[in-house]
Amino acid sequence: MTPPGDAQARRDVAPVICYPTDSLPAPDLARYARFRDAAQPVARHTIPARDGGAFHVPAGGFFRITCIEGPQVGDLNLFSAADPVERFYSGKTRALHGTHLSVGHRMWSGFPHLRPMATMVADTLGWYGRDAFGGRVHDVIGTRCDPYTHWQLSGGDMYHHCCHSNLTRALEAEGVAEAETRVHDVLNVFMCTGFTEETGQYFMKASPVRPGDHVEFFAEIDLLGVLSACPGGDCGAEHSSDSAACHPLQIDVFETPAAVLGDWTPPALNGYDGSHGR
């Protein structure tokens, strides 16, 4: 197609941030740090390689995801422990904070709840930044590897340890009804991803994570989490197969004493009246 005469002028229009966050209340990281100093360990979970598992975190507590043996990425889903209908909304989180999360960013729940579920408070990969390929860590872009896409792309192969399946089994084990329909787009913990410049395709590359690296979150509400140790290992080559070297991940849960939390309360449900102009 022949470009119009003003093609370059159209391209040169400056972008506008869709959702400016200046009016959002900023998380009080100093207060969270005081909570963390007083928090006590209450549970430790090991998520086996190429599998999933669940964990619970009380509001005002913390959870830490740690690489313990070798480079490994994880796919994280979060739910309200009181009502799993309320779940993490990666798309809105991405719209508010960007494609990759860092300290001070929040994981938001979906409509009609739309409130902070968890806040990132520590990240040993915070040094990574943006690499020469445009890669960053901890993305809210990817959907999770799944057996349906794998079936399509492989010509009919049945693989049962994709992250979608791992998360489904972990949620079922918690007694959540219709678990597969509750599983949702993830936070790709430790995963290094971006978009190619030429085609805009989503890419992955070997994660910079090493044993001892961790990311930690403050629980804004009572949480049920499920985590999959991705069958792609460090996602440097492929996923949805048993060919990649894979390793377990560790989750530690910490509870903050009520006396230390003081007058802190979980964020209220979103205040929109739900009328939609009807």
Image (spheres, grey):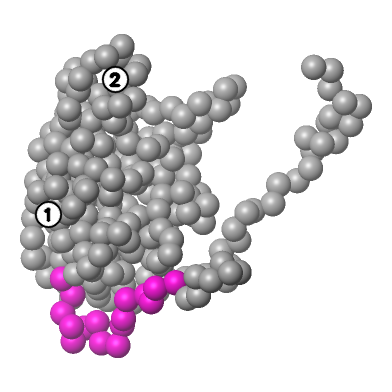
Q: Earlier in the sequence, mark 2 or mark 1?
A: 2
What is the x, y in percent for residue 144?
32, 36
- The amino acid sitting under disc 1 is Gly
In which quadrant is the N terminus drawn?
top right
Asked whether 240 or 123 is in front, the reply is: 240
Residue that mark 2 sits on? 151
- In the rendered image, the residue lying farthest to the right is 5
Q: Secondary structure at mark 1?
A: loop
Residue at the (21%, 35%) spot, across then down: 165
The quadrant in which residue 85 appears is bottom left
Chain part drawn in magenta: 255-270
Q: Report crowding for label 2: few under 14, some 14 to 19, many 20 or more residues within 10 A (C-alpha).
A: some
The quadrant in which residue 156 appears is top left
Q: In the figure, 265 relative to 187: above or below?
A: below
Q: Are marks 2 and 1 in contact (CB under 8 Å)?
A: no
Residue that mark 1 sits on? 175
Q: Report crowding for label 1: few under 14, some 14 to 19, many 20 or more residues within 10 A (C-alpha).
A: few
User: Is 204 included in the stretch rendered in magenta?
Assistant: no
Q: Is residue 42 left or right of residue 156?
A: left
Residue at the (85%, 36%) spot, across then down: 9
Residue at the (57%, 22%) spot, across then down: 199
